[in-house]
């Protein structure tokens, strides 16, 4: 029986990988682009690169341990349990002013990784997925990242899925926060035939706060599915969510967000918003923001929008001499930039904006 978390995900796109796993042969890829990207990232931060199911290079210390099996029960999660070779653990004890990049090369039809991070001081972690433009085969990568955020510690975490057309990605992020910790968790999804992002955020100590954000730009037959669950397990905790997407072609986006404020957690605050901009007649968005409140004296809001550009706003701009195509571009840029300005720090803003610019041309054409 399919749970509500997976009701709208088209698992037929990944079924063959799940059943066959690593019995599928490796394929030849052009590594020059992978090396080029890694070297560019080294200029602005530390880099851990993954290839062939293992750590390829690392500029920070890590340990290799038994892989985790205490995960949710679902075929893709079972695939991760089966196919991941080990659990790579990082303990970050000193302040990291520069980003720490975890870079995954999709160089096999099926591969899986398990990452464990214990955060004892402030850090900025960026997970980047690189698929080869020269690959003639489809590929699936499944990553489970578990992060423990110590008390009075700040975490910035970004997932960037900038994928080629045949790529499939499943990313499961589990973040546990202790008292007075802060987290900012952002997801950027560009390209890829199938992308599934699960996020579990546990606010376990009083004063813990989290800010979740996402941006997805999809065209053609691309599919993206976000399933977020935030658990307020202590009093005086706060969470914010803002997920926005632009959908063209025959693309489809799912947002399934649950916020649960448990018993004896007064003075908790939460706000959740998902907004979708549809730029073609065949694109589709399904949004299911949900609240489950089991205590009194809380503030909770949630909402969603699915629609096209506001004709009144277009009329306002064109009536002041702005060409219609330029007006469309201005409104779409404003829609996207709200998320970028809020969640993307200066250290990676140039890289993120460059990726978005390269994804815009087709969507801009459909806007007009």
Image (spheres, rainbow, N blue to C red):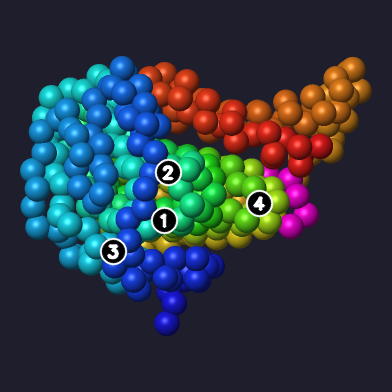
Q: Please identify, in this view, whether the residue under mark 4 or under mark 3 is nearer the observer.
A: 3
Earlier along the polypeptide chain: callout 1 or callout 3? 3
Earlier along the polypeptide chain: callout 1 or callout 2? 2
Query: What residue is rendered at 51% in x and 45% in y?
Result: 164
Q: Residues within 10 Å of mark 3 (few under 14, many from 20)?
A: some
Residue named by callout 2: 131
The reply to whether residue 134 is visible in this rendering is yes
Residue named by callout 3: 22
Give the image location of residue 161, x and y in percent. 44, 43
Q: Which element type, helix, strand or loop, lies under badge 4? A: loop
Residue 119 lies in what quarter of the image? Answer: top left
Earlier along the polypeptide chain: callout 4 or callout 1? 1
Looking at the image, do the residues carrying marks 1 and 2 touch, with CB atoms under 8 Å apart? Answer: yes
Q: Please identify, in this view, whether the residue under mark 2 or under mark 4 is nearer the observer.
A: 2
Disc 2 from disc 4: Cα separation: 18 Å
Disc 1 from disc 3: Cα separation: 11 Å
Residue 322 lies in what quarter of the image? Answer: top right
Q: Front-most of 343 and 78?
A: 78
Query: What residue is rendered at 23% in x and 34% in y?
Result: 48
Q: Please identify, in this view, whether the residue under mark 4 or under mark 1 is nearer the observer.
A: 1
Residue named by callout 4: 220
Q: Which mark is residue 139?
A: 1
Give the image location of residue 350, x and y in percent. 47, 20
């Amino acid at each position: 029986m399919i749970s509500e978390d997976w009701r709208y995900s088209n698992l037929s796109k990944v079924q063959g990988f799940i059943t066959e796993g690593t019995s599928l042969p490796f394929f030849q890829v052009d590594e020059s682009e992978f090396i080029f990207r890694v070297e560019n990232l080294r200029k602005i931060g530390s880099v851990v690169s993954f290839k062939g199911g293992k750590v390829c290079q690392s500029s920070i210390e890590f340990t290799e341990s038994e892989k985790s099996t205490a995960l949710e029960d679902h075929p893709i999660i079972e695939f991760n349990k089966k196919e991941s070779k080990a659990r790579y653990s990082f303990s970050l004890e000193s302040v990291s002013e520069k980003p720490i990049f975890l870079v995954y090369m999709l160089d096999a039809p099926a591969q899986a990784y398990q990452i464990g991070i214990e955060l004892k001081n402030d850090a900025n972690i960026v997970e980047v997925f690189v698929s080869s433009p020269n690959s003639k085969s489809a590929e699936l990568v499944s990553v489970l990242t578990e992060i423990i955020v110590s008390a009075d510690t700040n975490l910035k975490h970004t997932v960037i899925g900038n994928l080629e057309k045949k790529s499939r990605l499943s990313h499961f992020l589990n973040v546990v926060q202790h008292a007075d910790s802060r987290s900012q968790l952002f997801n950027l999804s560009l390209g890829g035939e199938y992308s599934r992002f699960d996020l579990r955020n546990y606010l376990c100590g009083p004063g813990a706060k989290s800010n979740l954000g996402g941006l997805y730009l999809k065209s053609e037959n691309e599919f993206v599915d976000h399933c977020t669950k935030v658990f307020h397990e202590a009093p005086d905790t706060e969470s914010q969510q803002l997920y926005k997407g632009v959908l063209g072609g025959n693309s489809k986006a799912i947002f399934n967000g649950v916020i649960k404020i448990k018993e004896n957690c007064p003075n908790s605050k939460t706000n959740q918003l998902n907004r979708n901009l549809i730029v073609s007649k065949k694109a589709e968005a399904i949004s299911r923001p949900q609240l489950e409140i089991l205590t009194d004296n809380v503030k909770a809001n949630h909402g969603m929008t699915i629609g096209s550009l506001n004709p009144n706003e277009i009329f306002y701009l064109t009536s002041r001499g702005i060409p219609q195509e330029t007006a469309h571009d201005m409104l779409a840029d404003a829609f996207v930039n709200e998320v970028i300005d809020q969640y993307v720090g200066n250290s990676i803003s140039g890289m993120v904006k460059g990726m978005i610019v390269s994804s815009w041309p087709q969507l801009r054409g459909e806007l007009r």
